[in-house]
Amino acid sequence: MEIFRKIIAVLGLILLLSGMAYYFLFRSDGEKYLDQGKEYFKESKYKEALFYFEKAEEFDLGEALKYSGTIYLESGDPQKAIVKFDKYLQIGKPSDNDRKMLLNDLGVAYFKLNEIEKAKIYWRQAADLGNITSANNLKELETKLVK
């Protein structure tokens, strides 16, 4: 039984080392930056995350633009968020779900800048793709404009 445990331990170690080798040898620097940024993002360490996302952007990883745009939007800099989100929509290949979220977030960014007509355009696009938050934002906006 003891030999069996040692074999399992050695196999586990081999798997761990091969996984680490793959990560360090076969992942691009940009992917490493993106992964590190995501880790910091999950931990709500946005300053550190932003550093790594912007490094990943240098390698044309569009997904990093989504994250850095979100950080800028949430930290009160909608103008920078708009730049990031627009670039991601242009050069990235966002999934349908990401596209819905990006369009909604662009609407939010323009709303924060008091550019209501632009906000409505993006919220309509997102709502047309099935984003419920955007549809609700439009309804609420229309209700406030009528009053």
Image: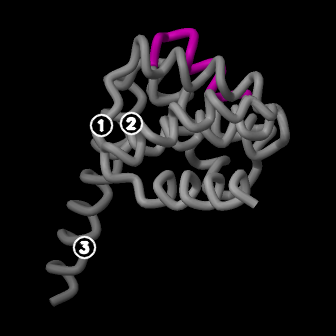
Q: Which mark is residue 99?
A: 2
What's drawn in magenta, residue-wise? Answer: 51-61
Q: Is residue 81 left or right of residue 96?
A: right
What residue is pinned by disc 3? Answer: 6
Tag 1: residue type?
Answer: Ser
Work out how far the residue at label 3 is from the one at label 1, CA to CA, in angstroms: 45 Å
What residue is pinned by disc 1? Answer: 95
Work out how far the residue at label 3 is from the one at label 2, CA to CA, in angstroms: 49 Å
Q: Quadrant of residue 28?
A: top left
Picture layout, residue 78 above or below residue 135:
above
**Number of the front mark, 3 or 1:** 1
Q: Provide the secondary structure element on which disc 3 rests.
A: helix
Using the image as rendered, state which of residue 122 and residue 26 is in the foreground.
122
Image point (76%, 50%), residue name: 45
Using the image as rendered, state which of residue 34 and residue 142 is in the foreground.
142
Image point (82%, 43%), residue name: 75
Image location of residue 68, percent across then percent down: 65, 32
Q: Provide the secondary structure element on which disc 1 rests.
A: loop
Tag 2: residue type?
Answer: Arg
Picture layout, residue 39 above or below residue 91:
below
Image location of residue 21, percent across then percent down: 35, 34
Q: Is residue 20 left or right of residue 56?
A: left
Using the image as rendered, state which of residue 47 and residue 97 is in the foreground.
97
Picture layout, residue 82 above or below residue 87:
below
User: Which is more N-terminal, label 2 or label 3?
Assistant: 3
